Amino acid sequence: MSVTLKGESALASQKISSISGVLEYDNSLFTVETADILPAGKDVKDCRFDPAEGKFSFKYDSDLTIKSTEPLLQIRLHTAADSSEGKTTVCVINMQWSSADGKQKAEIEHRIPAHITILEPELIGDVNGAGEVDMADARMVMQHYNGAAVLESIQQKKADVNGDGKINLTDIKLMMQYYN
């Protein structure tokens, strides 16, 4: 989920020293930790998040200039292990920014919703769709890697076990380790 600064002009910018808000989410469907609140800029001196209340805040070492339409922060949501398929809404509410001198303070938007659909998880490595990762999957990936066969695009996605964008011996090794 990404929260963007909105303004009247794409050239407008704001100097920001701190941001705070509340993340509303169904904690039976998602988990979020402090490390999952990713503010814009790198000079963050203090970042806090209370998962129980959804409150987050962070402060920068010095003012950060953010142009309109640039992301203020991103929030990573992790699907809980026991979540089921369905749709939900995640919101950021009461989000505010302030300048270093404290003279400028503004509420960014009252409610910033994100509509999220949770799908049945795919089993990464299950290239043949049998419902498990086994030696047949590793063999198919090895044949693709050697040029003896070509995997379909969905199979290629499942074959990239480590998610590095390449299908190679590392993926095959991980599949065999998982199987063993």
Image (cartoon, rainbow, N blue to C red):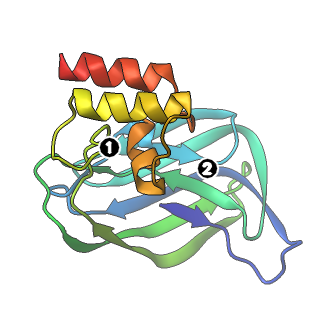
Residue drawn 50% across the image and 45% down it: 150
Find residue 166 and report its horizontal and vertical position in percent: 57, 34
Give the vertical position of 94 relative to 161 (above or below).
below
Give the vertical position of 132 relative to 66 (above or below).
above
Find residue 144 and report its horizontal and vertical position in percent: 49, 36
Give whichever of 177, 57 is nearer the camera: 177
Q: To which residue does mark 2 refer?
A: 18
Find residue 26 and report its horizontal and vertical position in percent: 21, 62
Find residue 13 and report its horizontal and vertical position in percent: 82, 65
Q: Is residue 122 left or right of residue 83?
A: right
Amino acid type, residue under disc 1 in the picture: Val
Which residue is the extreme one toward the right?
Answer: 11
**SS for tag 1?**
loop
**SS for tag 2?**
strand
Residue 72 is drawn in which quadrant? bottom right
Give the vertical position of 113 relative to 152 (above or below).
below
Disc 1 crowd rating (10 Å Cα; few below 14, some 14-19, many 20+) is many
Residue drawn 27% across the image and 63% down it: 25
Q: Please count the marks in the image.
A: 2
Amino acid type, residue under disc 2 in the picture: Ser
Which residue is the extreme one toward the front?
Answer: 148
Q: Quadrant of the C terminus?
A: top left
Q: Is residue 11 left or right of residue 38?
A: right
Q: Is residue 168 left or right of residue 22?
A: right
Disc 2 crowd rating (10 Å Cα; few below 14, some 14-19, many 20+) is many
Give whichever of 41, 149 is nearer the camera: 149
Q: To which residue does mark 1 refer?
A: 127
Residue 33 is drawn in which quadrant? top left
Which residue is the extreme one toward the bottom?
Answer: 8
